[in-house]
Amino acid sequence: MTATISKVTTIGHWAGGKSFPGSSQRTAPVTNPATGVVTGEVALADVDDARAVIDAAAAAFPAWRDTSLAKRSQILFAFRELLNARKDEIAAIITSEHGKVLSDAAGEVSRGQEVVEFACGIPHLLKGGMTENASTNVDVASIRQPLGVVGIISPFNFPAMVPMWFFPIAIAAGNTVVLKPSEKDPSAALWIAALWKEAGLPDGVFNVLQGDKVAVDELLTNKTVKSISFVGSTPIAEYVYATGTAHGKRVQALGGAKNHAVILPDADLDLAADAMINAGFGSAGERCMAISAAVAVGPVADELVAKIKERAATLKTGDGTRNSDMGPLVTKAHRDKVASYIDAGEADGATVVVDGRNPQVDGEADGFWLGPTLLDNVTPEMSVYTDEIFGPVLSVVRVDTYDDALELINNNPYGNGTAIFTNDGGAARRFQNEVEVGMIGINVPIPVPTAYYSFGGWKASLFGDTHAHGTEGVHFFTRGKVVTTRWLDPSHGGINLGFPQNA
Ligand code: NAD
């Protein structure tokens, strides 16, 4: 399978309100995963390019920080209206570079839009506190102010939603943004930049820096950049957290995942089987909240596996523009790596119940196809269990009891999302209390919090202490200031070198 090159577009940066080609000669190919055709060449920034984009954001900061909340929220509302009206455009861009089906691409934009809607309420969210007469005739007020230039580094799997977890709140709070999208699907970020301009955002408030490690390292070390919001794989998240914090930055670095769903013997197995299909194979498993391990407790396994198998047979794999249920994987290399995990699972003794290695597809022969795959009798030592596969591979792990299931999850290094399927409220209550994972679903397979709650995992799924969006997001993108004031009582007691006391 060699990729043919036709009508290749050049994909550059965006700085100071316009596209910016940069001086670097390095580029990376951008491919349509459903056809295998290279459609673009994305610029890979050198250090000078990265500094030029960061400088554009720094130049815009003083005026944007002083722009009134009324004006900022008007621009956010305008952006929300444009995004809502034109989300089909960005969904088509996402499908053409990522491969996910159009409805799923539109779905990710809608979930990102919820954060824009949340950020429209920034005047309320930024309200500080005020205490009158903390000491006699002395008042104390707290305010929150923007950080300055903030960096966002995002993964390939959500080119719109993940950046939107951060930038609406960052901008609303008065910061200026440099977004470094994934080099695999870089065009959505440029579409968003143009939309901000149309919504009336001043030039330089939202900027896009295309690139790889060189661009990331400049963001992590450049003194002008005050914070980093990273989402991607665990090894890079750990590196970003360590490097960014060592350079004095505030960092939230969200990493990889291995999400389990526990199916208790009293669960509604039709509901659970539907949920395993949706959460295991949606977006071809390339979701950080995908379920990759179904933990069947006690006697449910045989019936559960039969129900998932029956449903998997109905799924249509194909080009995301052709009404398919599941699209291709993002690159050929990733497709081959995921297939190799199926080979390894089989060699290790797992039962291949549904085999996606040679799927029937509605798409071009050179697309990066892999069908839904169901493995049974997977054990915790197998690589198909230990590794984050990030593909349409669902493993069934059989355990005897609820406690075995809980132990399995709590021993896993990741802690992003998990779910339990049961009709027993007491068991669900125990699970939500005992499981060491950041986001829990009870009869809900992909428990992605709404915008006004915060998104974040535990353990190797998040480095840093602040989750994305919600009030934690507002807190991340602002810093506190406390003002102590005395107006009415100029007699302050004269000279007194003792430590000030409240009286
Ligand atoms: P990735 O870690 O390869 O890349 C993420 C970002 O880091 C990209 O912008 C990339 O250009 C940059 N990068 C890659 N290698 C780098 C390096 N050596 N030094 C500096 N920067 C580097 O991740 P991906 O493959 O794009 O995305 C998939 C991963 O993201 C999965 O592990 C998935 O679980 C994770 N993810 C997590 C969440 C979450 O909320 N926890 C959400 C979405 C995706």
Image (spheres, rainbow, N blue to C red):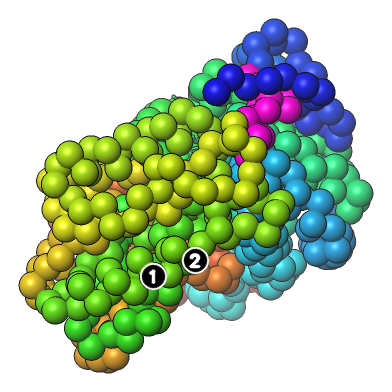
Say left or right for 57 vs 346. Answer: right
Question: Is 78 or 425 nearer to us in this picture?
Answer: 425
Q: Residue at x 47, y 47 (%)?
A: 359
Q: Is residue 441 visible?
A: no
Say left or right for 220 vs 116. Answer: left
Q: Secondary structure at mark 2?
A: loop
Residue 350 spot, x, y in % from top left? 18, 50
Which quarter of the picture shows residue 431?
bottom left
Question: What predominant SS class does the magenta segment belong to?
Answer: strand
Residue 402 spot, x, y in % from top left? 14, 76
Q: Are marks 2 and 1 in contact (CB under 8 Å)?
A: yes
Q: Residue at x 35, y 50 (%)?
A: 355
Q: Which residue is mark 2?
A: 314
Which quarter of the picture shows residue 313?
bottom left
Q: Is 354 placed above or below 246 here?
A: below
Of the 4 image quadrants, the one containing the N terminus is top right
**Which amino acid is tagged 2?**
Thr
**Which amino acid is tagged 1?**
Glu
Question: Is 222 or 385 nearer to us in this picture?
Answer: 385
Question: Is 49 or 424 nearer to us in this picture?
Answer: 424
Q: Which residue is mark 1?
A: 310
Which quarter of the picture shows residue 235?
top left
Residue 31: say if magenta.
yes
